[in-house]
């Protein structure tokens, strides 16, 4: 039975995370539809139609979908659900907000944050901050799933030629209303899709000291992240957080600076291809997962590293 | 306004868990258990709302085996007024938990329900959203700030891109992120006082909820281990390795 993917989009752009969810959907069934709900979201629907492997794009327009709340998206998905064998979204804050609400409306026990599709009803997912890997089989006819984006490749943005169908919106529930958004970050790549991530921990000592990491990050086109300890200490905002309760990243290169390597942090980055650890404590657990470890004072090493990278090439 | 907070008993976040050798699950016997950290934040927020005069009563709810009452005592010692324990030894999935909580909510008629955003054992991140759906209430997930204005609750949410604000009609469900507050420690006199606070015990049968699991755990295994690599002596050596060996920059 065909599969529906809830597309996420911001400012007229299809989110990268959705491409990963599409790949997970393709592992379930070859027939993959994508729902684009928005306001004047034609460009997003067209982008989704070009993604390789997509059969149909369902475009639903409503002023309330311009900045949709979970209450309204769940109602729209609920109406579409009977035609599908599975409904998926990426495990972003958006997907995590909407999908359990949908699952409950459908009386389905969601499988969260899957990392592997073993069969039509069987999935792998991490529990206990990534310290155990569970194989879960669901007995629900309809599957509601969220997808860990780092575990599935992005579907190619080009190569598809899906049809675009306009579908009716569902009247908003009128119980929740979007008020506003403050977007941080700016020019740097987004944390979960960056090829390189430079993260700081409590060892950074202060928020001001993060400029050292930003200089390094800008030199190599990296995103900047942080451990929960650094977030808790108020050095950086929560959206920087990499770990069990923050973002899960798996870049080609992860540089952990002044991060001891608590299991909750490792849960968010240990699937990175190459891990570099810079820490003054040679006993720090981060070194147990690092491909390259450098023991020493980060305040000396990080500027030196930035300078070294600037020097050659 | 009554505020309901949900608290889950989980393996303490400092425990390095062990996967059982027969692959049936994670060893929890003889392991230190604590209140789910996000639920501590939920409890703290509810108590602060009462202290600020926005709530009159804080009711803590926990579901599961008899020992959940220890977790409820912790919530009572922090300052919750009374507690409800839905007792069962059966495993509970988030959907079943949400259904049980819905029945409790229909009995108690709270104006607000606060949950943690996820439990650190199953890492599901579902219960609050499911509960809101079943009640037909709005949801403010991953909350870092709550403000009451004009009969609405404005929730600042931690989202991937930064912060988002939504306005919810009450009653509503809020799930907490870690920056909402810093939970207090229970003082000794409050721990003593908590022993006298009431805990009502209910069962899933009394609440008329089918809690049969939908999921079957076929296997629990150790995740693939990462090999630890090499120590480098200098920045120059590191850059050389990254360029010529790992080829990532």
Image (cartoon, rainbow, N blue to C red):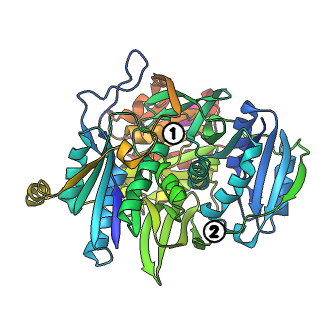
Q: Position of residue A113 (x, y in %)?
A: 56, 40
Residue at 50%, 33% in the rendered image: A126
Q: Is residue A237 magenta?
A: no
Q: Residue furthest top?
A: B22
CB under 8 Å between callouts 1 and 2?
A: no
Residue A200 in view: no
Range of magenta residues = B232-241
Majority secondary structure of the magenta segment? helix
Residue under label 1, please give it. Answer: A269
Residue B78 at least partly seen: yes
Q: Chain of mark 2?
A: A
Tag 2's secondary structure?
loop
**Within the image, what quadrant is residue A41 found in?**
bottom right
A276 or A89: nearer the viewer: A89
Would you say A210 lies left or right of A191 here?
left
Relative horizontal placement of residue A166, taking residue A189 as reference (left or right): right
Decide which of B194, B161 is in the foreground and name it: B194
Q: Whole-percent x and y of residue B38?
A: 37, 53
Secondary structure of residue under mark 1: helix
Question: Is tag 1's residue or tag 2's residue first in the polypeptide sequence?
Answer: 2
Q: Is residue A142 above or below residue A174?
A: above
CA separation in Å, label 1 and label 2: 38 Å
- Quadrant for the C terminus of chain A, please: top right
Q: Which residue is pictured at 52% across the width and 52% down the height? A: B130
């Amino acid at each position: 039975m065909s599969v529906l993917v809830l597309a996420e989009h911001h400012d007229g752009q299809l989110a990268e995370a959705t491409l990963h969810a599409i790949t997970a959907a393709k592992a379930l069934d070859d027939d993959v539809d994508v729902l684009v709900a928005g306001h004047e979201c034609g460009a997003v629907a067209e982008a989704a139609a070009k993604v390789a492997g997509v059969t149909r794009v369902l475009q639903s327009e409503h002023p309330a979908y311009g900045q949709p709340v979970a209450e309204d998206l769940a109602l729209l998905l609920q109406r579409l659900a009977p035609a599908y064998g599975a409904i998926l979204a990426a495990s972003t804050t958006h997907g995590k907000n909407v999908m359990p609400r949908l699952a409950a409306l459908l009386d389905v026990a969601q499988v969260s944050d899957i990392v592997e599709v073993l069969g039509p009803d069987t999935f792998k997912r991490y529990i206990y901050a990534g310290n155990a890997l569970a194989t879960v089989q669901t007995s629900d006819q309809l599957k509601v799933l969220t997808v860990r984006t780092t575990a599935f490749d992005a579907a190619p943005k080009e190569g598809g030629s899906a049809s675009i169908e306009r579908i009716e919106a569902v009247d908003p529930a009128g119980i929740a209303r979007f008020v506003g958004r403050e977007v941080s970050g700016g020019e740097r790549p987004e944390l979960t899709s960056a090829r390189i991530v430079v993260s700081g921990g409590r060892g950074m000592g202060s928020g001001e000291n993060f400029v050292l990491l930003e200089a390094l990050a800008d030199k190599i086109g990296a995103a900047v992240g942080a451990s929960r300890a650094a977030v808790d200490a108020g050095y950086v905002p929560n959206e920087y957080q990499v770990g069990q309760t923050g973002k899960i990243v798996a870049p080609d290169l992860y540089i952990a600076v002044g991060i001891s390597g608590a299991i909750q942090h490792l849960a968010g980055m240990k699937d990175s291809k190459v891990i570099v650890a810079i820490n003054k404590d040679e006993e720090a657990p981060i070194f147990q997962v690092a491909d390259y470890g450098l023991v020493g004072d980060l305040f000396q090493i990080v500027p030196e590293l930035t300078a070294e990278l600037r020097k050659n090439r | 306004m009554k505020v309901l907070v949900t608290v889950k008993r989980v393996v303490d976040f400092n425990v390095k868990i062990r996967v059982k050798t027969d692959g049936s699950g994670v060893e929890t016997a003889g392991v230190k258990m604590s209140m789910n950290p996000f639920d501590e934040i939920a409890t703290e927020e509810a108590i602060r709302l009462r202290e600020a005069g926005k709530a009159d009563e804080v009711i803590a709810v926990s579901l599961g085996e008899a020992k959940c009452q220890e977790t409820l005592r912790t919530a009572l010692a922090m300052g919750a007024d009374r507690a409800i324990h839905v007792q069962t030894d059966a495993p509970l999935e988030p959907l079943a938990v949400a259904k049980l909580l819905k029945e409790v909510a229909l009995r108690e008629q709270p104006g607000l329900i606060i949950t943690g955003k996820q439990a650190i054992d199953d890492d599901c991140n579902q219960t609050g959203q499911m509960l809101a759906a079943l009640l037909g209430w709005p949801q403010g997930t991953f909350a870092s700030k709550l403000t009451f204005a004009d009969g609405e609750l404005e929730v600042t949410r931690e989202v991937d891109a930064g912060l988002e604000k939504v306005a919810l009609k009450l009653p509503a469900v809020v799930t907490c992120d870690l920056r909402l507050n810093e939970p207090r420690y229970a003082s000794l006199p409050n721990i003593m006082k908590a022993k006298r606070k009431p805990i009502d015990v209910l069962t899933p049968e009394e609440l008329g909820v089918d809690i049969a699991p939908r999921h079957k755990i076929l296997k629990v295994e150790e995740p693939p281990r990462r090999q630890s690599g090499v120590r480098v002596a200098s920045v120059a050596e590191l850059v050389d390795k990254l360029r010529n060996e790992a080829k990532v920059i």
